[in-house]
Image: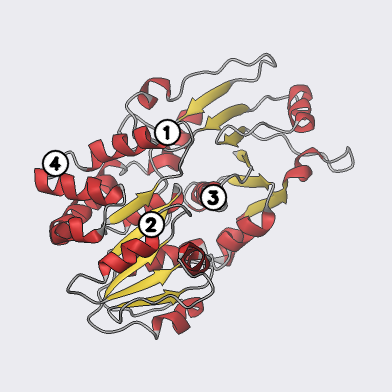
């Protein structure tokens, strides 16, 4: 089948990350023809760099405006159109679908959520005045939700680094032996510097891998933005370059603890089988708090009372000294959660469930 995925990038990387991973899942695992129409090609191409050229070649990445070219370049009618995260289709593209001899189905691919209500709305019809069938599709962790994106299915994190991506070789040489590694990818507005200062009070050494732009964010949040950041020797800050999606997946698998944000990195951190802080995108109406609580209800369902308290404290940015004593139990829990997740998604997760629904 031919699929058109429409992606408007709202939050830097997350939306593009999900659309790209879905496109590669549909092509590489299910042999589908996929086009992505995106309003921010530089970001999408950055995330897609470093991937197997054969996969990249099979996905047609187009600028948003290309979806409604003039009659000399008619856009072929797809079988399935995906509005990622409820973005509206361009009017001229929709007009083209209305006069096409065969009508596609339109899928409104929603944001991932663990909230119980999504199961009731998942796969429900959304009748439109134009008459083209449209449905809601809710990614989720529950068996009767839309699933999560698994491609590529992560291998067990390596105990020894047999391979280091070229783009990360310089950063990796700075890592110290017998030192815990934490990757950091979060939004502004959290007390990250204070968090790191508190981390330094623990009886451990930490190498902190800061993703692209995080050091500047840290510097800006310090009391003296023009002076170098002063942290004790137990903490080493290492800035890593902007890396492709696959390379970032690898970074998550090589760290002991990950701070992530958005949707794509949130799933990949869980599939890395390591403890994580999900810096969920803050919404003015506080909806993110409900979403986080729903995830924690699922994530901590089988956890001890002590671990529940520790993880909830960590996820709400309590200082590490308040919860780090539970890190070993949390690490074991993360591995078990990863195994449960893979078992629950053994049908192939989101891409396979979409295929089944469309069929």
Q: Residue 195: in sight, yes or no?
A: yes
Separation (CA) of disc 2 from disc 1: 19 Å
Looking at the image, tell me whether mark 1 or mark 4 is earlier in sequence order: 1
Looking at the image, tell me whether mark 4 or mark 2 is earlier in sequence order: 2
Q: Residues within 10 Å of mark 4 (few under 14, many from 20)?
A: few
Residue 283 in the image: x percent, y percent?
47, 37
Residue drawn at x 52%, y 72% is 241
- Residue identifier under label 4: 302
- Residue identifier under label 3: 27
The local secondary structure at tag 2 comes to loop
Q: Quadrant of residue 319?
A: bottom left
Looking at the image, tell me whether mark 3 or mark 4 is earlier in sequence order: 3
Looking at the image, tell me whether mark 3 or mark 2 is earlier in sequence order: 3
Residue 33 in the image: x percent, y percent?
61, 46
Residue at the front extreme of this rendering: 223
Give the label, 3 or 2, closer to the camera.
Answer: 2
Taking the image as shown, residue 303 lies to the left or right of residue 257, namely left
Separation (CA) of disc 3 from disc 2: 41 Å
Q: Are marks 3 and 2 in contact (CB under 8 Å)?
A: no
Give the label, 1 or 3, closer to the camera.
Answer: 1
* Residue situated in front as seen by the camera: 185 or 79: 185
Residue drawn at x 30%, y 44% is 346
Taking the image as shown, residue 303 lies to the left or right of residue 104, namely left
């Amino acid at each position: 089948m031919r699929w058109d995925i429409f992606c408007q990038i709202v939050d830097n990387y997350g939306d593009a990350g999900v659309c790209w991973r879905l496109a590669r899942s549909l092509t590489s695992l299910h042999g589908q023809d996929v086009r992505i129409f995106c309003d921010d090609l530089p970001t999408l191409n950055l995330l897609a760099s470093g991937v197997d050229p054969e996969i990249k070649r099979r996905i047609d990445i187009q600028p948003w405006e290309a979806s409604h070219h003039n009659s000399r370049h008619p856009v072929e009618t797809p079988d399935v159109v995906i509005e990622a995260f409820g973005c509206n289709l361009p009017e001229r593209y929709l007009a083209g679908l209305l006069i096409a001899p065969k009508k596609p189905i339109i899928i409104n691919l929603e944001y991932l959520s663990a909230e119980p209500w999504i199961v009731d709305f998942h796969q429900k019809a959304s009748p439109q005045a134009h008459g083209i069938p449209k449905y809601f599709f809710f990614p989720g962790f529950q068996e009767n939700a839309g699933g999560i994106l698994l491609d590529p299915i992560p291998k067990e994190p390596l105990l020894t680094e047999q391979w280091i991506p070229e783009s990360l070789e310089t950063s990796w040489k700075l890592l110290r032996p017998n030192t815990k590694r934490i990757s950091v990818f979060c939004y502004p507005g959290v007390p990250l510097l204070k968090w790191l200062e508190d981390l330094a009070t623990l009886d451990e050494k930490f190498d902190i891998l800061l993703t692209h732009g995080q050091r500047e964010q840290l510097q800006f949040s310090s009391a003296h933005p023009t002076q170098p950041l002063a942290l004790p020797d137990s903490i080493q800050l290492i800035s890593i370059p902007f890396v492709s999606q696959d390379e970032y997946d690898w970074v998550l698998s090589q760290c002991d603890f990950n701070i992530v944000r958005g949707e794509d990195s949130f799933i990949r951190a869980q599939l890395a089988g390591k403890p994580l802080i999900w810096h969920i995108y803050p919404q003015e109406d506080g909806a993110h708090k409900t979403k986080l609580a729903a995830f924690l209800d699922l994530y901590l369902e089988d956890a001890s009372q002590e671990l529940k308290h520790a993880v909830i404290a960590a996820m709400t940015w309590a200082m590490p000294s308040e919860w780090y004593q539970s890190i070993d139990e949390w690490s074991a829990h993360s591995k078990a959660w990863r195994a449960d997740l893979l078992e629950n998604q053994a049908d192939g997760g989101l891409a396979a469930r979409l295929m089944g629904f469309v069929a």
